Amino acid sequence: AKFLQNNLINRRGVLKNALRRDLPYRMAKSTADTMFRAAGLTVFRAGRAYFRSRVQPLSKASRPSVPA
């Protein structure tokens, strides 16, 4: 989680200058944001697939009853 936070989510300050408006900067920032979002989705989907393969759903008979 620390690796993802430092390198993918936070990007260590790379392309985080809110005052810059020039086209090359905006294109680089947009490209980086798209790549990081895709990487995050890939990690999320891989984790979800892993846990779905490992965790078996409870049968109806073994589910705890929930009071209404």
Image: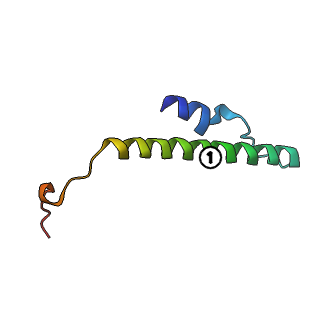
- Give the residue drawn at x 87%, y 44%: 24
| Residue 41 point in image, percent of width and height | 55, 47
Q: How many marks?
A: 1
- Give the residue drawn at x 74%, y 39%: 15
Judge by depth and name the residue closer to the eye, 40 or 29. 40
| Residue 68 point in image, percent of width and height | 14, 70
Q: Is residue 66 left or right of residue 27?
A: left
Q: Is residue 28 left or right of residue 67?
A: right
Colour scheme: rainbow
Q: Which residue is mark 1?
A: 38
Question: For residue 5, what is the image quadrant?
Answer: top right
Q: Residue furthest top?
A: 3
Question: For residue 17, what is the image quadrant?
Answer: top right
Judge by depth and name the residue closer to the eye, 32 or 19. 32
Judge by depth and name the residue closer to the eye, 46 or 65. 46
Amino acid tagged 1: Ala
Residue 56 visible from this viewpoint:
yes
- The kind of secondary structure element at disc 1 is helix
- Give the residue drawn at x 59%, y 39%: 9
Q: Residue furthest bottom?
A: 68
- Give the residue drawn at x 52%, y 41%: 43
Residue 18 visible from this viewpoint:
no
Q: Residues within 10 Å of mark 1 (few under 14, many from 20)?
A: few
Question: For residue 8, what is the image quadrant?
Answer: top right
| Residue 2 point in image, percent of width and height | 50, 29
